[in-house]
Amino acid sequence: MQLTIRNLSKTYPNGVQALNDVSLDIPTGMYGLLGPNGAGKSTLMRTLATLQEADSGSAVLQSAADGGVDIDVLKNKDAVRNTLGYLPQEFGIYPRISAVDMLDHLATLKGIPSGSRKAVVNALLQRVNLWDHRKKSVSSYSGGMRQRFGIAQALIGDPKLIIVDEPTAGLDPGERNRFYNLLSEIGENVIVILSTHIVDDVRELCSNMAIINGGQVLYAGAPDTALKQLEGKIWEKSITKAELDDYQSRYQIISSKLVAGKPIIHVYSDTDPGDGFQHTAAGLEDVFFSKINEKN
């Protein structure tokens, strides 16, 4: 199965071009969509989830190899919704309804027959490790529990395409790891698009990714391939805050972060820039910032 996106564009009435000729091939498995806030990620996710229209382009869910029928995502919205699981960045809940009743209600809306609905709901609650908390209202859940409930509702009906938008923002490290494990398990047999601005999410989970900014695709491929492109080209140095402006004027700084109160800068250079810089192994953050800065 593969989701094929070609030349997708979207401009809002206020003149903001959220998507600019976006083309991607998204195979089965975990696919990371990485970009800063306002890059166009949510617009792309909402378009694929049939929640808004694109101005031009196409998106096709190709499933013929599985004995199914290809689905035109932009034109055949009912067919998409029948095979889609969606976890938006914010999702509404009824404040006094328990998790088990809420899932049962959502399963009814999804068309799950009454005879099998209870078994489906119970299996989902166990899968996301919420069985012991099934009678509590979702509004009383912690952030991590609420996200796991969100995955449970997204899995109703055995979807072939799952979209999750900024799923780990605000989670503590323990909940984030539990969420990673759950997403990895889900992504073995279906397409899971993970939209995020958190580099660690993509590094931990995804075998393929795209970097998007300003509505344009800056990179699409495997994280390892992107890292190899920067091999031997990233240099770092610890400086004082007062020196930062001077270094920015003299070097191609792709990132800066404070460690023990002092900036550590990473610069991109094909050769040793000297001046006390040390070679360092490229990380996915370097890929991300180098692509973003290259665009700017």
Image (cartoon, rainbow, N blue to C red):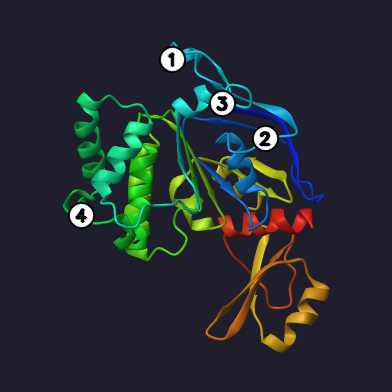
Say what amino acid the circle numbered 3 marks. Lys
Which numbered disc, 2 or 4, marks the residue that appears first in the sequence?
A: 2
Give how far apart the Cα atoms at labels 1 and 2 are: 28 Å
Which of discs 1 and 4 lies nearer the camera? The answer is 4
For this rendering, which residue is in front, 171 or 109? 109
159 to the left or right of 37: left
Q: Is residue 20 visible?
A: no
Give how far apart the Cα atoms at labels 3 and 2 are: 11 Å
Q: SS of the residue at dot 2?
A: loop
Q: SS of the residue at dot 3?
A: helix
Residue at point 56%, 26% (across, down): 77
- The residue identified by callout 2 is 53
174 to 135, vertically: above or below? below
108 to the left or right of 48: left
- The residue identified by callout 3 is 77
Which numbered disc, 3 or 2, marks the residue that appears first in the sequence?
A: 2
Which of discs 3 and 1 lies nearer the camera? The answer is 3
Residue at point 35%, 55% (across, down): 146
Which numbered disc, 1 or 4, marks the residue that appears first in the sequence?
A: 1
- The residue identified by callout 4 is 133
